[in-house]
Amino acid sequence: MNKLNKEVSEFLDGLNHPLRDEIENLRHIITNATNGLTENIKWNGPNYCYNDNDRITMKIQPPKQIQLIFHRGAKKQEQPEDRIIQSKSKLLLWKENDRAIITFKNRFEIEKAKADLSSIVNEWILRAK
């Protein structure tokens, strides 16, 4: 079953983005990491929601890299005492205990990180409330 949103695909088709293959790879990794995610557009990039709450946003501009922003929605919330997830992965750059970023510059970085990324997405969805 294809979990990708047709409107997101059409939006990306119109961009002629130099990292389009990488974006597509990330879309598949994210949507296959856990059940219940929906995909839409937010901040001019793919966005992933769980129970109608924004959780992961893909920042695709400027077109030199792709960033995955892991968050708990648009509204600032009280900070948890500890980080949302306790991943040992070196991929996450923590901005606050409830917000982290992963940056990719090419398909090789994405392929190398695929297993870790899938695990991070799954755990983030389970724990970010």
Image (spheres, rainbow, N blue to C red):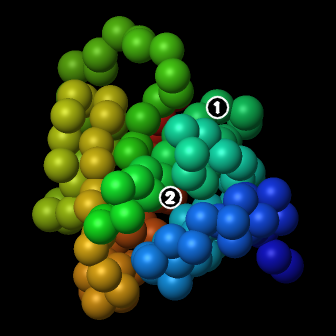
Q: Which residue of the protein is positioned furthest toward the top in this rendering? A: 78
> Which quadrant of the view contains residue 64?
bottom left
Side of 121 where 92 appears, left or right: left
Q: Is residue 57 above or below residue 24?
A: above
Residue labelled with disc 2: 122
Identify the residue at image location x=31%, y=35%: 99
Q: In front here: 66 or 94?
A: 66
Can residue 11 be seen here?
A: yes
Task: Decide: few, some or many residues near mark 1? Use Cα within 10 Å; few <14, some 14-19, many ≥20.
Answer: some
Residue 103 screen position, x and y as percent: 27, 61
Identify the residue at image location x=85%, y=79%: 1
Q: In front here: 119 or 53?
A: 53
Residue labelled with disc 1: 53
Give the distance between the C-alpha atoms of the residues marked 2 and 1, in whole angstroms.
15 Å
Identify the residue at image location x=51%, y=71%: 17
Q: Secondary structure at mark 1?
A: strand
Side of 100 where 89 appears, left or right: left
Q: In front here: 65 or 88?
A: 65
Q: Amino acid at mark 2?
A: Asn
The residue mark sitting in front, 2 or 1, is 1
Side of 23 where 112 appears, left or right: left
Q: Secondary structure at mark 2?
A: helix
Residue 14 screen position, x and y as percent: 69, 66
> Which quadrant of the view contains residue 94?
top left
Q: Is residue 100 above or below residue 62?
A: above
Residue 120 screen position, x and y as percent: 38, 59
Task: Decide: few, some or many residues near mark 2? Use Cα within 10 Å; few <14, some 14-19, many ≥20.
Answer: some
